[in-house]
Amino acid sequence: MKLRKKAYGDANMVGKNIERLRKEKGIKQKDFIAKMQIMGCDINPTSYSKLEGQSRSATDKEIFFAAKLLGVKIEELFSAEIE
C-alpha cells in the first residue's frame, strides 16, 4: 500500500475517511474510480486523488457514490473522530 506523499488539505471533510475506508476494504484507487465512473459519477484519477487528499471540494454526487460503494451511511464520511 502506497503512503500519502503530501499532507492532507482542508478543502473538504470527507477525503481522509473515504481513503481510509477504501484501503480498509482493500480496494485500489484505480478500481474505486472505475466503479464510481460505472455508477455514473464523472471523475478522473487526478480529481479523485485531490478529493482524497482534501485539496479540493467534494461534490454531493461524489460523496453519495463513495458512501454507496463503501457500504456506509453518508454521515460516516463526515466523522471527525475517525482518524
Image (tube, grey):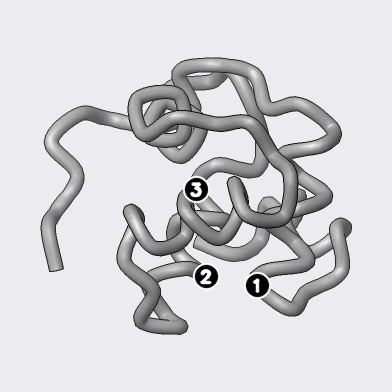
Which of the two discs, 1 and 3, labels the residue nearer the N terminus? Answer: 3
Q: Position of residue 55 (x, y in %)?
A: 45, 18
Q: Position of residue 10 (x, y in %)?
A: 54, 20
In the image, residue 20 above or below residue 26: above
Q: Which mark is residue 16?
A: 3
Check disc 1: other Cα within 10 Å, few if <14, some if 14-19, many if 20+.
Answer: some
Spatial CA span between label 3 and label 2: 9 Å
Three-letter residue code for mark 3: Lys
Which of the two discs, 3 and 2, labels the residue nearer the N terminus? Answer: 3
Three-letter residue code for mark 2: Leu
Query: How many numbered tags mark residues here?
Result: 3
Please name the residue that numbered disc 1 is placed on: 70
Indicate the secondary structure of the residue bearing disc 2.
Answer: helix
79 left or right of 32 in image = right
Which of the two discs, 1 and 2, labels the residue nearer the N terminus? Answer: 2
Q: Position of residue 56 (x, y in %)?
A: 54, 16
**In the rendered view of the protein, which quadrant contains the N terminus?**
bottom left
**Viewer-side label of 1, 3:** 1
Check disc 2: other Cα within 10 Å, few if <14, some if 14-19, many if 20+.
Answer: some
Please name the residue that numbered disc 2 is placed on: 21
Task: Report the residue at 45% width, 83% height from top.
Answer: 25
**Viewer-side label of 1, 2:** 1
Task: Report the residue at 41% width, 26% height from top.
Answer: 50
Task: Report the residue at 85% width, 58% height from top.
Answer: 74
73 left or right of 19 in image = right
Spatial CA span between label 1 and label 2: 7 Å
Indicate the secondary structure of the residue bearing disc 3.
Answer: helix
Spatial CA span between label 1 and label 3: 13 Å
